[in-house]
Amino acid sequence: MREACVNGESLRVEDVVAVARNFAQVKVPPSVFEKVGFSREVLEKLVEFNETIYGVNTGFGALGNVRISREDAEKLQVNLIRSHSAGVGKPLGLDVVRAMMLLRANTLAKGYSGVRIEVLERLVDMLNKRVHPVIPEKGSVGASGDLAPLSHMVLVLMGEGKAEYKGKVMDGKEALAKAGIKPLKLRFKEGVALNNGTQMATAIAALNVHDAENLVKNAEIAAALSLEALHGVIDAFKEPIHRAKPYLGQFLSARNVRLLVEGSKLVLDGKTATQKLGYPQDPYCLRCIPQVFGAVRDSIAYVKRVVEIEMNSATDNPLVFGDETLCISGGNFHGEHIAIAMDLLGIALSCLGNISERRIAMLLDEKLNRGLPAFLISEKSKKGINSGLMLAQYTAAALASENKVLAHPASVDSIPTSANFEDFVSMAPNAARKAMEILKNSQYIVAIEFLCACQAVDLRGPEKLGKGTKVAYSVVRKVVPKVEEDRVLSGDIEKIFQLVRQGRIVDEVEKCVKLL
């Protein structure tokens, strides 16, 4: 089984997915414990010298001007976690919770948080023994970090709150006991070191990035099938065009489609298309696939860079700098980078879904689909009695339209909190959750394109497909047969959606065509 190394420096999106979804074990190298221990020693010396340190011997937020006695410092941390556990709504998915825990451990591993070694050890133990806090999905504004969701996580670390263990939800204390983990008694600084940061938004963002990379490959495969089903013109995908506009994403998308349809007897060159069908070029939903998907690819690449920087950052406040014997307050908990990146991802994936829906509409419209029957139901069926795939496009249109609403950026919104002391917040969690919903909608739209494109290919002749698209067609047809007469389509869409979401079409296609 793959292991993920938590050192505060080198965590990648792939590591997050391995831990969050595949339950990879988490390891902490000895050098990290040295850094964490040294940071704690420095903080303890500063406390002994009676330095005023935010969140250690002061209150929080607008109460930061209230001095707290040494006797009350530990109670302060416990009260912080309890009072900030104010989340609402349905619980976050198990993969998001595990990703949050991993990212929080990785932040502590940087050695700037001033916690005891036991804190990091206990959090990693919970991950490896699969004690999963129940964390409501709503309640964070993304500054001072994801306070409410992280507080719900820490409750279980303390032996409070609710947790899922071996498929059952129970009291946090009981879950820890069953897993053989002792509850953690928080000491000074440790509550604020655990609940102050961007880990909820970043956890969702990391999973979104992974799923978006998979989706864009699925979308290229579905688009290639549609290109063949519609006798599309291959000229628009030829390399010289994309060298002339040298965006990397555009170049890769054009290359992928060319490789997918290699050997196809269905696509045409411009000269043949003009002679046989009367058109030298295609509508934009076919001709501009590389330009649109290229922009999506480049956006995902940018977002991934942002997310991986955030994953390996110290995001709590204050931070302890041991070599300089300093504890400094700042604003690394602010989620603006993630908020803007997730808004961008949502916009990019909305565009992906929009152009996919346009190809679906073209496939079903007998005035546009170049000789295919209306709604892709065989001419042998009685016209009017069978509606074919008509309603599949309605569903795609509904999803595409919902994406347009969801794509409104969350990062431009802000509601002041903590008596106007925290007066500009990021709304990163909202941006991340919206992007996750747009992603899911777009996965459904691409699944519907697969459904329609494969139906159209059946009418053209699947033996004429290219080497990559032929594999994709075969994968779909193993779970969803051709529509001969009207039947319930929702089950078909769900089956193909799972193929898309799980990456099974991409995996099979990449056995013969290496997509980049």
Image (spheres, rainbow, N blue to C red):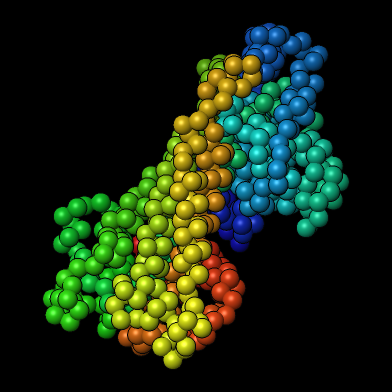
Quadrant of residue 420 in the image? top right
- 282 vs 84, left or right, is left
- In the rendered structure, the answer to whether residue 250 lies left or right of residue 365 reads left
- Which residue: 49% across, 64% down? 394
Q: Which quarter of the figure is the C terminus placed in?
A: bottom left
- Residue 368 position, x and y percent, is 31, 72
Q: Is residue 222 above or below residue 479?
A: above
Q: Nearer the viewer, residue 146 or 270?
A: 270
Q: Position of residue 500 (x, y in %)?
A: 50, 66
Where in the figure is residue 319, as x and y percent of width and height?
57, 23
Q: Residue at x 50, y 82 (%)?
A: 386
Residue farthest along the front direction in this orientation = 384
Residue 514 visible in the displayed image: no
| Quadrant location, the N terminus | bottom right
In the image, is 353 to the left or to the right of 50? Answer: left
Residue 349's place in the image compared with 284, above or below, is above
Query: How many numbered tags mark residues here?
Result: 0
Q: Quadrant of residue 158?
A: top right
Is residue 114 among the parts visible in the rendering? yes
Tell me the residue at 71%/39% (across/down): 88
